[in-house]
Amino acid sequence: MPQFSRNLDVYQGFNFKKDKQSPVGYITAITIGGQALAPDQETIKDPENPDAAIGDKVVAVLNHYLWETGVTDAMYFSGQVSVANKQKVAEMLLGNFSNIEVNFKYVIYEYDPIGKKYFKSNFLDAEMKGLLEKNGDDLNMSVADNESREVQSPKNFTFQIGIKPQAAEQSLNLATSSAKKIAKKWGITEAAAK
């Protein structure tokens, strides 16, 4: 089965340059166990309109995204979060998780060399509902203790999370160019699984 895996340019994500054409991605909203991480990364440019900022601030500037494209496959995100969000994730990890629900939104942009413009290659129309993935007994979520050196200002820390779908059919959009888009399903309803 094909996978959607992208190495994303963190430097370009923070410091967008019109003459560079590497893929970028962002988590625009995420709530983990009922606790929202703040969308506090500011002045992030919209690759489709680089003279303007993305409508909202973002939670994380992504450096990697992976989804095996199966309806029950987990999505994996790795990106840079602020000091405040690093502290919040660390607090969550030290506490006890009774609620592993995750609500999130994200977007990935790539450059179309034929269309000569950036386009959204993986994006949502609505917030996704998932669950924190487990690796054995451990939840698949972490945050670095030491700040990243790839972009030194603002201070940022590597955050990683694996999210599997809740028992509900949801959809996301994938695109291979600015003109070729398809909708994919993520998650299945419990009735459909029986």
Image (cartoon, rainbow, N blue to C red):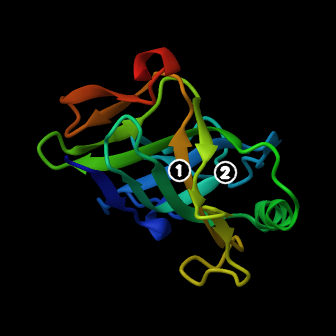
Residue 123 position within the rendered picture, expressed as x and y whole percent measured from the top left: 42, 35
Left or right: 155 in relation to 47? right
**The residue under label 1 is which amino acid type?**
Tyr
| Secondary structure at numbered mark 1 | strand
106 or 130: nearer the viewer: 130
Picture residue at 57% right of the left edge, 48% below the top: 27
**Relative to 63, residue 182 above or below:** above
Quarter-wise, where is residue 121 in the image? top left
| Secondary structure at numbered mark 2 | loop
Left or right: 18 in relation to 165? left
**The residue under label 2 is which amino acid type?**
Val
Q: Report which residue position mark 2 lands on.
A: 59
Residue 1 position within the rendered picture, expressed as x and y whole percent measured from the top left: 19, 46
Query: How many angstroms separate mark 2 from mark 1 (CA)?
Result: 7 Å
**Relative to 17, residue 150 above or below:** below
26 or 16: nearer the viewer: 26
Residue 45 position within the rendered picture, expressed as x and y whole percent measured from the top left: 52, 49
162 or 124: nearer the viewer: 162
Q: How many discs appear?
A: 2
Picture residue at 44% right of the left edge, 64% below the top: 12
